[in-house]
Amino acid sequence: MAFASGSGGGPMADINVTPLVDVMLVLLIIFMVTAPILSYPIDVNLPQRTLNPPKNPKTPPPPISLRIDASGTIFWNDSPVDVRVLQQQMVNEVAKDPTNQPLLEIDVNPDADYGILAKVLAHAKNADMQKIGFVQPQ
């Protein structure tokens, strides 16, 4: 009798663990492959707590409206500007008062080229602009 156990002669009631082991090995391989991807750190500049708040807070300067239309033209406060001189304008704004920078409000047309936006953001980073916001489409 092929299914007989040693003493009772009835059917064998052992659980077949081979499929369970197969599933566990596949999950182990998946976790081994994805674990290194999840371990890259992301640098985030968070504001630090100060024990002595400033006694005389400065009023922020008016925000800068930067608009990119569908054709890729960049408008700095409603006046067209070339992308090559944009970084110099940003550096000039930061140089006025590096501790009290204006907010750069970027409004991008959904049909605009992403490359233009990438250049604008790179110029803002290189000019050390700290306050950058995006205008929500209405």
Image: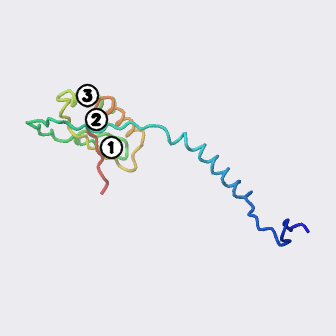
Which residue is labeled 1 in the image?
A: 68
Q: Residue at x 55, y 43 (%)?
A: 35
Q: Secondary structure at mark 1?
A: strand
Which residue is labeled 2 in the image?
A: 81
- Taking the view exactly as shown, the residue that stands out farthest to the left is 56
State left or right for residue 126 relative to residue 35. Answer: left
First-in-chain label (1 vs 2) = 1
Q: Nearer the viewer, mark 1 or mark 3?
A: 3
- Image quarter for residue 84? top left
Q: Secondary structure at mark 3?
A: helix
Specify the quadrant that holds the N terminus. bottom right
Nearest the viewer among 28 and 133 is 28
Nearest the viewer among 127 and 38 is 38
Note whether 78 is above or below 88 in the view shown.
below
Note whether 70 is above or below 88 in the view shown.
below
Which residue is labeled 3 in the image?
A: 91
Which amino acid is tagged 1?
Ile
Kindly indicate whether the residue at mark 3 contacts the one at mark 1 (C-beta within 8 angstroms): no
Nearest the viewer among 105 and 30 is 30
User: How far is disc 2 from disc 3 in space, using C-alphas?
Assistant: 15 Å
Image colouring: rainbow
